[in-house]
Image (spheres, rainbow, N blue to C red):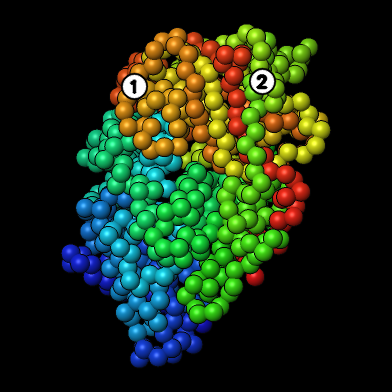
């Protein structure tokens, strides 16, 4: 690192007097501290120790930026008390503002500042929008793998609690805070440490709330998350979708199709395109999504397929430094880097990797121009369950076609919360995630329904959001329905490659209302037992080319544990201790045409939009 100067633990005083610590990286060739040759400046604010993962700050400094990496309030070298996303009166809003302006005023800065970072460090960037205005010196942002609403993608999805994420994630933060607050007990094994070692077993505990290790040390973080099952004022303070109108700078949103925050990354882009404060910000915001799990854009291996790692082609990965440097070169240096254009001369605001096509494609918008939202309907003779499969009858009987159903018997199964379907792949950071073979979830199950197309005569490309309308009833006052989209290659395997999923909880809001609206989840509304509802389920946006000879498959179940907590079917919520089995019925007839709306893009359109990669040259 001889060519990069690193200043450790620079003191940055906040408006309330709290001092936060930052490391500053800059190229040694930048000269002196006299103010001459000031550099465009990048700021990252993180709770994960500013002294770790220095590769990107060093590389950005080598590209001619001054880089500030700061421990957020109450973590590592910074003063204050940490509370995830809510430290000391939501200080992230003011702390971020003060830090950006501090960086702009330093002699090594030219006064033009951008922000970067992924995950929580994406959230600290979005916190800037929660104030009355963005910092005057801020000219561009680059939040990666970032959510849009902590209720909508972080702590809950479709009204169901994201159990493994909530418990494991907050417990890890709590271990760090406890050790910081009790240095005299550093050698002691705390209740939080014991919980971390036994985490996979703790997922099974009932009630879900309260969480005993937090109760033992006096932290209320998880009690608050699980004590607010509906979207209310508590979650409003962690909802970025309410603040797009404050943003008046370009924003680069980047993430992965298999990320826990995938839906949020896309939502932030589309929200800014509609609601950002200025036409310049609306026009300049961009979206980059690859076939990646949380933060793993440099890895080809993104999941586990029947005993071996699933690897995407080499062109699926990219260097984050190149993406960031290209973005900030354009927006923090005058005249550097014009935006690339697509085949029709339109700007490539959107750059997506499409598995199956195995190429990056560019578009001016998301969903892509020319997308047809096509209805595929569920069909069966009442025999769509995976338990109907045997050595004598190896095929699945449920069908998925574009023909509307006629008079068909419904499919039925019993969901027992004591024996849930175990999570296989998907949007997980605290459980095995990414691409996976769904057949591993089918073994010895009689509570999963499968509907699939005939082998496709020609390729079908899906790029965009997916919505399922499931006409269903339950014997319970509360239950869940979970839908998984898979790509099935019949000659290769009986299972299907996980592509995307969505869930809906019965007691939280109106199950027939828009599943993507935050207003849908504001009330508890128990179900009428045996009443037929048109459940609306948002399957998260994705991209996939289903090759000729493959099948498009939809699974329907009532659990996906521990990604989602088990719905006990009692209507009690997360503080309940009892469980009931629920008899589920899925209808697909002329009066109840259960369907999935798929975003179909002509393959020739994708081929015409192929790019060299996600980084504009």
Above or below, 586 against 39 in this view is above
The tag on residue 346 is none
Point out residue 399 in the picture as x, y percentages from the top left corner.
70, 20
Residue at horizontal 78 percent and vertical 29 percent from the top: 455
Q: Which residue is mark 2?
A: 404
Question: Which numbered dot is residue 525?
Answer: 1
Residue 568 location (% of width, % of height) = 40, 19
SS for dot 2: loop
Residue 564 position within the rendered picture, expressed as x and y whole percent measured from the top left:
45, 30
Q: Quadrant of residue 347?
A: bottom right
Residue 146's x, y, as percent?
45, 51
Q: How many marks?
A: 2
Q: Is residue 589 left or right of residue 265?
A: right
Q: Would you say residue 201 is visible in this rendering?
A: no
Name the residue: 18% across, 64% down. Answer: 16
The vertical placement of 346 against 374, above or below, is: below
**What crowding class fits label 2: few (fewer than 14 Cα within 10 Å), some (14-19), or many (20 or more)?**
some
């Amino acid at each position: 690192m001889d060519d990069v100067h690193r200043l450790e633990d620079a003191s940055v005083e906040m408006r309330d007097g709290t001092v936060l610590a930052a490391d500053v990286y800059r190229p040694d060739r930048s000269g002196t501290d006299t103010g001459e040759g000031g550099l465009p400046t990048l700021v990252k604010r993180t709770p994960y120790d500013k002294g770790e993962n220095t590769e990107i700050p060093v590389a950005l400094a080598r590209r001619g930026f001054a880089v500030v990496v700061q421990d957020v309030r109450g973590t590592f070298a910074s003063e204050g008390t940490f509370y995830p996303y809510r430290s000391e009166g939501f200080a992230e809003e003011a702390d971020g503002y003060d830090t950006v302006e501090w960086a702009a005023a330093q002699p090594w800065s030219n006064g033009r500042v951008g922000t970067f970072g992924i995950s929580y460090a994406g959230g600290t960037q979005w916190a800037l929008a929660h104030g009355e205005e963005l910092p005057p010196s801020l000219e561009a942002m680059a939040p990666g793998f970032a959510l849009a609403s902590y209720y909508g993608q972080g702590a809950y999805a479709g009204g169901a609690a994201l159990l493994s994420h909530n418990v494991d994630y907050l417990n890890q933060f709590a271990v760090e805070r406890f050790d910081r607050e009790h240095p005299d007990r550093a050698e002691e094994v705390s209740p939080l440490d014991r919980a971390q070692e036994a985490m996979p077993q703790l997922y099974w505990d009932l009630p879900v709330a309260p969480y005993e290790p937090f109760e033992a040390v006096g932290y209320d973080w998880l009690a608050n998350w699980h004590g607010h099952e509906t979207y209310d004022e508590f979650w409003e303070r962690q909802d970025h979708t309410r603040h797009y109108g404050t943003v008046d700078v370009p924003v680069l949103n980047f993430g992965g199709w298999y990320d826990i925050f995938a839906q949020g990354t896309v939502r932030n882009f589309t929200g800014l395109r509609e609601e950002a404060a200025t036409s310049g910000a609306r026009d300049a915001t961009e979206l980059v999504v690859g076939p990646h799990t949380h933060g793993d854009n440099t890895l080809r291996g993104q999941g586990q397929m029947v005993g071996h790692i699933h690897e995407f082609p080499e062109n699926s990965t990219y260097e984050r430094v190149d993406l960031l440097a290209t973005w900030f070169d354009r927006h923090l240096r005058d005249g550097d880097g014009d935006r690339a254009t697509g085949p029709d001369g339109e700007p490539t605001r959107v750059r997506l990797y499409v598995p199956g096509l195995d190429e990056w494609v560019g578009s001016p918008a998301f969903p892509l121009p020319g997308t047809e939202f096509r209805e595929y309907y569920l069909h069966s003779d009442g025999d769509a369950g995976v338990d109907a499969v045997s050595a004598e009858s190896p095929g699945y009987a449920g069908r998925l076609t574009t023909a509307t159903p006629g008079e068909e018997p419904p499919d039925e199964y019993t969901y027992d919360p004591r024996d849930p379907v175990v999570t296989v792949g998907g949007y997980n950071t605290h459980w095995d995630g990414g691409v996976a073979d769904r057949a591993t979830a089918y073994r010895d199950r009689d509570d999963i329904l499968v509907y699939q197309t005939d082998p496709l005569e020609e390729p079908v490309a899906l790029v965009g959001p997916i919505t399922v309308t499931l006409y269903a009833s339950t014997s319970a006052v509360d239950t869940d329905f979970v839908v998984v989209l898979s790509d099935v290659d019949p000659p290769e395997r009986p299972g299907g490659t996980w592509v995307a999923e969505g869930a809906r909880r019965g007691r939280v809001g109106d199950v027939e209302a828009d599943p993507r609206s935050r207003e849908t989840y504001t009330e508890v509304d128990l179900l009428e037992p045996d009443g037929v509802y048109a459940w609306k389920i948002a399957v998260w946006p994705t991209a996939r080319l289903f090759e000729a000879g493959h099948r498009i498959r939809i699974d329907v179940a009532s659990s996906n544990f521990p990604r989602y907590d088990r719905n006990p079917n009692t209507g009690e919520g997360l503080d309940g201790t009892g469980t009931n089995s629920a008899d589920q019925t899925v209808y697909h007839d002329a009066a109840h045409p259960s369907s999935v709306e798929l975003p179909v893009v002509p393959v020739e359109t994708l081929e015409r939009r192929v790019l060299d990669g996600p980084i504009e040259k």
